[in-house]
Image: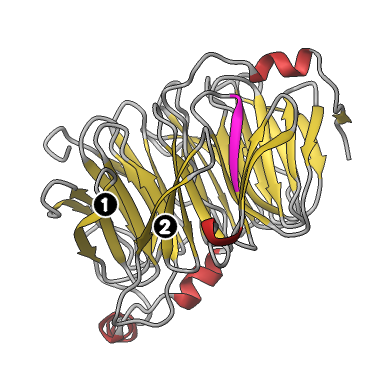
Amino acid sequence: MSGNENSGDGEFDDVINAEDILHVIELDDNRDISEVMEEADLGEDFDDDMEASGGQIEVQDMAGVVFDKHKDAVFSVHIDPNTSQLAVTGGQDDTAFVWKISTGEVLFECTGHKESVTCTSFSHDGTYVATADLSGLVKVWKIETKEDVFTFECSDAEWMKWHPGSHVLFLGTVDGDIWMWKIPSGECKTLQSHGCTVSCGVILSDGKRMCVGYDDGSLKIWDLKSVSVQHNITGVNAHKSTVLCVDTHPVNNVILSGSTDVTARAYNSSTGKLLGSYDCSSPETEEDSVEAVALSPTHSYAATGTVAGVLSIWDTNTQICRHKCRHEGGIVSVQWDRLTPQVYTSCLDGAIRLWDARNGEMVSKWTGHTDSILGFDVSRDGKYLVTVSEDKTARVFSLSTSDR
């Protein structure tokens, strides 16, 4: 174990007091993907196709680049938000790679992990890349020198995020603690557990607070400077079971969470007040959960995705569901386009889709994977879509202006 714990004020606090951030980079939730796949009902047609093709589905490969250096399922991906030229992927083979999106060329391998690498992320300026595995081993690498500059071991990792405006790294663990490190010095603070797993988290747009969800259905809004809880959302205002995902609006004070209780809930981050609850259940299925939520940065829309394969588009002003968009498999993650009222979905059926929130119509569909997609990211410049899959590959798709 390395890194220095420091619970007091000082230089560490200065990096938290960043100016308002209008765009928070979101990563996929790092729930064990096997749990999601077990709950998803892909349907008889999916199974028949798999059996007829010997386990491989015949699909049109629309990818411009196929990254095939991983030896097992690839769980996580993030694109450098600074240059949009590099991707980092982590997989079940206990490895992570930083590679060039345009060619698939490996820049360097992030070695030393003990178990599946489920969390990978670049810092906001692309100076560092962080990787974390299921055992709780966290490593940070400097891109310019390709050197390991920070290593820490804690309990099993659930999720990891960088601060959107400074070199501060956050890691949520199965024992419920949230670690907060200043990189590369390793100065450390801990947001203490109340006794259950912290399942997801997001830094709020002011850069000074964080909202996290827990296995018992509760949520907390933490002040990062004082390491104190501003709002503790429990009881009737909380979820009835595990909070799987949480998002925040890049400008206003709205937080959106999703849960295994098959609801999404909106809160005011300033007051902790419950603004509304969205029923995301599907009458045709009993086993379901909300796996992904996202708030549109440009319109008054919210998106929720479920294991049953339903993308719901909600009007946040009226709390009315505008559209339900059906998928052939469970939805793993959703992400809004930065400029338009369109939303991407990744699905266990092996495809990425783009939907128009105004009419509920599918705008584009990208195929090429022969197994479930486990995560994706869209480059900040809007040119590339990178996906990772159970089929041991990552794929790069070019995005045209007509798609968006």
Q: Give residue 369's position: percent from left, percent from top.
A: 34, 60
- Residue plotted at (51% across, 36% down): 269
In screen coordinates, is 31 left or right of 168?
left
In screen coordinates, is 293 left or right of 9?
left
Would you say the residues marked 2 and 1 are in contact, meaning their CB atoms lie under 8 Å apart? Answer: yes
Q: Main secondary structure of the magenta part?
A: strand
Q: Give residue 317's position: percent from left, percent from top.
A: 26, 43
> Is residue 209 located in the magenta-colored stretch of the structure?
yes
Q: Give residue 148's position: percent from left, percent from top.
A: 73, 30
Residue range corresponding to the magenta coloring: 208-212
Instruction: Answer with the quarter of the image where residue 110 lies.
Output: top right
At label 2, counting other C-alpha atoms closer than 10 Å, the crowd grade (few under 14, some 14-19, many 20 or more) is many
- Residue plotted at (29% across, 48% down): 344
> Is residue 202 located in the magenta-colored stretch of the structure?
no
The label on residue 236 is: none
Numbered label tally: 2
- From the viewer's side, name the closer residue of 210 and 74: 210
Q: What amino acid does circle 2 point to?
A: Ala
Q: Earlier in the sequence, mark 2 or mark 1?
A: 2
The answer to whether residue 394 is visible is no
**Vertical position of residue 157 compared to residue 146: above or below:** below
- Residue plotted at (47% across, 72% down): 37
Which quadrant, please, contains the N terminus? top right
Task: Provide the residue designation for mark 2.
Answer: 264
**Vertical position of residue 378 compared to residue 349: above or below:** above
Task: Provide the residue designation for mark 1.
Answer: 314
The answer to whether residue 403 is visible is yes
